[in-house]
Image: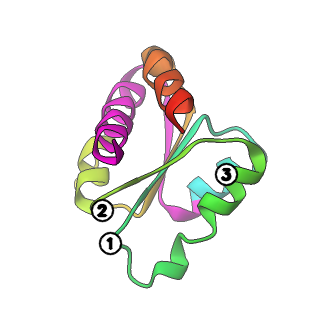
């Protein structure tokens, strides 16, 4: 189920990057989650040191924003359409990914 959620999250990022808005990187993701503008937060498991992103799930839970973990930074960067790995991504405007995000929220 975790892999299914990760796949849905990556798919939602790919859709939202063209039809909505996403924030790339740990700092921008943190800001979006803190401000409550994020609809979905996605972080990578392989971030070193882990302290860079370990606060995001806590803030997301506090704000009622679903937070999904994916296996690698490379996958996350690729889904976001950037040529480099990224530690975290927040979807701020869903666009056509609204249905996917609703699915993820229901499972979280």
Figure quadrant of the N terminus: top left
Q: Is residue 59 visible?
A: yes
Which is closer to the viewer, label 1 or label 2?
1
Label located before the other in sequence (3 or 1): 1
Q: Percent from the top left, x then y, of residue 61?
A: 69, 51
Counting from the top left corner in percent of width and height, residue 55 is at 63, 69
Cα separation between marks 2 and 3: 19 Å
- Tell me the residue that label 3 is attached to: 60
Q: Which residue is mark 2?
A: 73
> Which residue is farthest bottom?
49
Badge 2 density bin: few <14, some 14–19, many ≥20, Cα 10 Å? some
Q: Which residues are magenta?
A: 1-27
In the image: residue 60, left or right of residue 22? right
Q: Crowding at label 1, few (<14), some or many (≥20) Cα neighbours within 10 Å? A: some
- Residue located 28% across and 38% down the image: 7
Which residue in the protein does label 1 denote? 46
Mark 1 vs mark 2: which is more N-terminal? Answer: 1
The colour scheme is rainbow
- Residue 54 lies, with reference to residue 40, above or below; the image says below
Where is residue 57? Give x, y as percent: 60, 59
Q: Quadrant of residue 29?
A: bottom right
Q: Element at badge 3?
A: helix
Q: Would residue 81 be seen by someone viewing this image from the given angle? A: no
22 shown above or below 52: above
| Magenta highlight: main SS | helix
**CB atoms at circles 2 and 3 under 8 Å apart?**
no
Q: Residues within 10 Å of mark 3 (few under 14, many from 20)?
A: many
Please tell me whether residue 94 is drawn above or below residue 22 in the rendered image: above
Q: Is residue 23 magenta?
A: yes
């Amino acid at each position: 189920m975790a892999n299914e959620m990760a796949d849905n999250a990556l798919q939602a990022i790919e859709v939202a990057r063209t039809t909505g808005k996403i924030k790339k990187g740990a700092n921008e993701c943190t800001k979006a989650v803190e401000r409550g503008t994020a609809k979905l937060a996605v972080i990578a498991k392989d971030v070193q040191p882990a302290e860079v992103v370990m606060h995001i799930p806590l803030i997301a839970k506090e704000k009622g924003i679903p937070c999904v973990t994916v296996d690698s930074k490379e996958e996350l960067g690729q889904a976001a359409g950037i040529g480099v790995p990224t530690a975290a991504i927040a979807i701020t405007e869903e666009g056509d990914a609204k249905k996917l995000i609703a699915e993820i929220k229901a499972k979280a």
